[in-house]
Amino acid sequence: MLNFYYPELKDRDWVQPILSASGGLGSEHAFGTMYVWRWTYCRQICRYKDFLLSGFGKDLRAYVVPEGTGDLREAVEVLIEDAKERGIPFRLWGVTKERLEEYESLFPGKFDYLPLRDDADYLYRSEDLIQLAGRKLHGKRNHLAQFNRSYQWTYEEVSRENFKDCMAVAHEWCLKHGSCGEDGHSEENCAVAAALHGFEPLGMKGGLIRIEGKPVAFTVGEEINPRCFVIHFEKAVDGYNGLYAAINHEFAANALSGYEYINREEDMGIEGLRKAKLSYQPAILLEKYMAVPKGETL
């Protein structure tokens, strides 16, 4: 069997260059994604020749599309053999629509490719989120203008000096929305803490908004590659109209103008989140598929 293990900060040195060189735009192409959620989703990695192999879920519920250079067919076959040795069904997550033809040519008639709409990433042109130009984003401009008129606010970069303020916002949001456990913590807040704890080594960037000095919203993300930046977390406390629009816009305007795309991740099938992400008019809906042996189901 392959030697899968939970990623550590030091693994970024070899993992991120592979992910970046792949040219992929999905959130899974950022090392921080697998690192900060490693305990929640049991995300594990393994190096095979010049490939990054990875999987997630208890007892490796699914493997993730291999990334690297060399014989892709061999890399996938190694994963198939690993699944046999573990006595688990083979599942390969993250085949994008653009790569379906490639996988079918390598494995003709071997797999069915099941669409995973809830896992599709929303990608926006950075200039669209910064300028909010055009008729379709007219409502967003109005929302932002109303925020600017209503509050005395300031924006600052996330740094070690305000990590505690970011966590205070995350905790308040958690309590308000009923996602905290009995101990007052949540899996998402643990992931936020992991991102802040490894902020510099992970190459994270972020922005924080204060209203009359009080921290009320923050966002954190990282570069996938020189074309694309992914937003991992965006939280705002209740009671301030237009606050989400403001943190979204200010971070893009202050930190992300050099990127072609901003990946705001998936909607997880949550209706309200899907509506909100679609309302910003994504340039790309990055569809993903699960490859399963012919005739099998999830």
Image: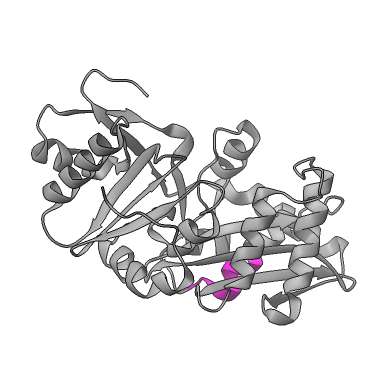
Residue 286: which quarter of the image?
top left
Q: In the picture shown, does residue 61 fall above or below 246?
A: above
What x and y, as percent, mark residue 221? 55, 65
What x and y, as percent, mark residue 11? 40, 70
- Residue at image point 31% right, 34% down: 91
Q: In the picture shown, does residue 252 fall above or below 46?
A: below
Q: Is residue 250 left or right of residue 203?
A: right
Compare residues 11 and 269 and report the one nearer the observer: 11
Residue 250: which quarter of the image?
bottom right
**In magenta segment, residue 251:** yes
What x and y, as percent, mark residue 225? 37, 68
Hey, which residue is sitting farthest right in the picture? Answer: 212
Magenta span: chief secondary structure? helix
Name the colouring of the figure.
one colour
Q: Where the C terminus falls, by quadrant? A: top left
What x and y, as percent, mark residue 213? 88, 74
